[in-house]
């Protein structure tokens, strides 16, 4: 049962922390370090770097106690989680299955961001006018939407794609593994599905890029500001509220927990036994059409509108942080587009909070709508994860759930709450190991 990775985990953590301290100390002593102000915070200033260095030194002093308590995960687990969070929070990626998958996901996101940065920077070199948008920026908008759509549909596991490339480009490899493929038909089905997805993405991405280019080149985003932004905000909030909150609530068995029957009932609701194909109801059609409108028309238009306004301000107000501003704009646009394409359920909540908070409560600290929306989506994502973890723990430690395990485990879970806030994945795995399928059976009993 010896794990060789544990031997290298502590030295790697120690070397990484010491390297960060030396790097921050060198940056704090620089004569003319670059400084960027975001939400009133001077990033990369000498004071900021010195404070970060001091915090890391204090953390390094606590290293023996933290290692003794086992709060550090294995280094490979830490790298997988770190890369996964970078891809999910900053690029809008999905969950990964291993270190190879994590590196692949982050690498393709960075490659796409670098390509978009080169195109966008070339488009904002010269000042714009409200009556003319450079064709290069319109091409950037089309490329951004097309790449975001393609990346949102791709898996984070590169094994199927690599197998598909090997079989298509290297026929000898296919003949060598012919017997294995004949024994298991699943790989062939997976390759066929990958082929279908790539063909469909090629067609859709071309159409989306052309349409985005045409809409951006029409100067509608600059000519109708700020009226168009207000209309898009209100429409996105209303459509999201109806699609992701109102319709699902009306279809529940007990809407809002105070109505005894669903308001929107299926045709087979009163039948004791269904003997025919289920009838497709009007509200189910409405749900699908509203979701398609929200994912493929409304949010892309909203994000392209914000991108065009931000790029117009950058091109006409040249400043030192142009590269930094363009980088943040591209990262925010890519992340929001990918999230809107693959998981738009909570986007209307993030959008509503962004508009209310930064347009009415704290208008003075707002950077831009795109960056505000980006930061709020990250904040709400982490708060949602924390809420789910707390619900998991509090449900398990409830007195009436003592039958799920021994009294000692229920009592011991109370002391695990602070650790779950920082290492909840380990606790989740531990619980599934101890209780297995009984976890899913007992609540129904």
Image (spheres, rainbow, N blue to C red):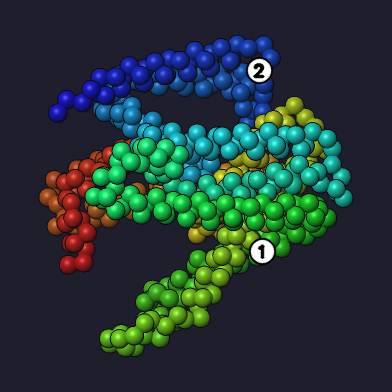
- Is 125 on the left-hand or right-hand side of 22? right
Q: Choose the circle earlier in sequence order: 2 or 1.
A: 2
Do we see residue 365 in this rendering? no
Residue 289, position in %: x, y?
Answer: 56, 70
- At x 52% / y 46%, what residue is drawn? 151
- At x 22% / y 48%, what residue is drawn? 432
- SS class of the residue under badge 2? loop
Q: Quadrant of residue 69?
A: top left
Residue 96, position in %: x, y?
Answer: 39, 42
Do we see residue 148 in this rendering? yes
Q: Which residue occupies the foreground of this view, 401 or 216?
A: 216
Q: Which residue occupies the foreground of this view, 299 or 427?
A: 299
| Quadrant placement of the N terminus | top left
- Is 66 on the left-hand or right-hand side of 81? left
Number of numbered tags placed on the structure image:
2
Residue 89, position in %: x, y?
Answer: 50, 42
- Is 310 on the left-hand or right-hand side of 129? left
- At x 74% / y 56%, what residue is drawn? 215
Residue 33 tag number: 2
Q: Is residue 260 above or below residue 314?
A: below
Q: Is residue 397 above or below residue 54?
A: below
Which residue is denoted by mark 1 in the rendering? 234
| Quadrant placement of the C terminus | bottom left
Residue 338, position in %: x, y?
Answer: 55, 49
User: CA separation, marks 2 and 1?
Assistant: 42 Å
Neighbourhood count class around disc 1 (C-alpha, 10 Å): few under 14, some 14–19, many 20 upward: some
């Amino acid at each position: 049962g010896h794990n060789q990775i544990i031997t290298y985990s502590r030295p790697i953590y120690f070397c990484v922390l010491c390297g960060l301290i030396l790097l921050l100390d060198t940056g704090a002593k620089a004569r003319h370090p670059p400084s960027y102000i975001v939400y009133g915070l001077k990033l990369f200033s000498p004071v900021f770097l010195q404070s970060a260095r001091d915090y890391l030194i204090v953390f390094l002093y606590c290293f023996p106690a933290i290692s003794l308590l086992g709060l550090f995960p294995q280094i490979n687990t830490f790298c997988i989680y770190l890369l996964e969070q970078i891809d999910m929070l900053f690029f809008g990626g999905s969950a990964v299955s291993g270190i190879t998958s994590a590196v692949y996901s982050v690498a393709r996101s960075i490659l796409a961001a670098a390509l978009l940065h080169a195109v966008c920077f070339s488009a904002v070199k010269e000042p714009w006018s409200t009556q003319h948008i450079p064709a290069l920026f319109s091409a950037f908008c089309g490329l951004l939407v097309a790449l975001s759509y393609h990346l949102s549909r791709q898996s984070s596991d590169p094994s199927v794609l690599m197998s598909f490339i090997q079989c298509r480009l290297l026929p000898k490899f296919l003949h060598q593994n012919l017997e294995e493929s004949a024994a298991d038909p699943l790989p062939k089905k997976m390759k066929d599905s990958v082929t279908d997805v790539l063909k469909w993405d090629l067609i859709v991405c071309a159409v989306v890029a052309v349409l985005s280019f045409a809409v951006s080149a029409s100067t509608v985003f600059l000519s109708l500001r700020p009226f168009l932004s207000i209309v898009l905000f209100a429409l996105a909030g209303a459509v999201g509220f109806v699609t992701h909150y109102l319709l699902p609530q009306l279809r529940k068995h007990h809407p809002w927990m105070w109505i005894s029957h669903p308001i929107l009932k299926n045709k087979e609701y009163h039948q004791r036994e269904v003997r025919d194909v289920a009838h497709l109801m009007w509200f189910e059609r409405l749900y699908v059409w509203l979701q398609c409108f929200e994912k493929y028309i409304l949010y892309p238009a909203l994000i392209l509108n914000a991108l065009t306004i931000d790029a117009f301000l950058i091109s006409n107000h040249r400043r030192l942080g142009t590269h930094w501003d363009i980088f943040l704009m591209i990262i925010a646009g890519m992340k929001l587009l990918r999230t809107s394409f693959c998981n738009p359920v909570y986007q209307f909540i993030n959008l509503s909070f962004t508009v209310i908070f930064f347009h009415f409560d704290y208008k003075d600290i707002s950077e831009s709508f795109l960056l505000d929306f980006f930061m709020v989506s990250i904040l709400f994502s982490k708060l949602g994860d924390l809420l789910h973890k707390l619900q998991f723990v509090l449900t398990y430690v409830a007195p009436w759930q003592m039958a799920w395990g021994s009294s000692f485990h229920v009592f011991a879970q109370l002391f695990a709450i602070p650790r779950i806030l920082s290492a909840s994945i380990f606790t989740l795995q531990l619980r599934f190991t101890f209780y297995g399928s009984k976890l899913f059976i007992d609540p129904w009993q």
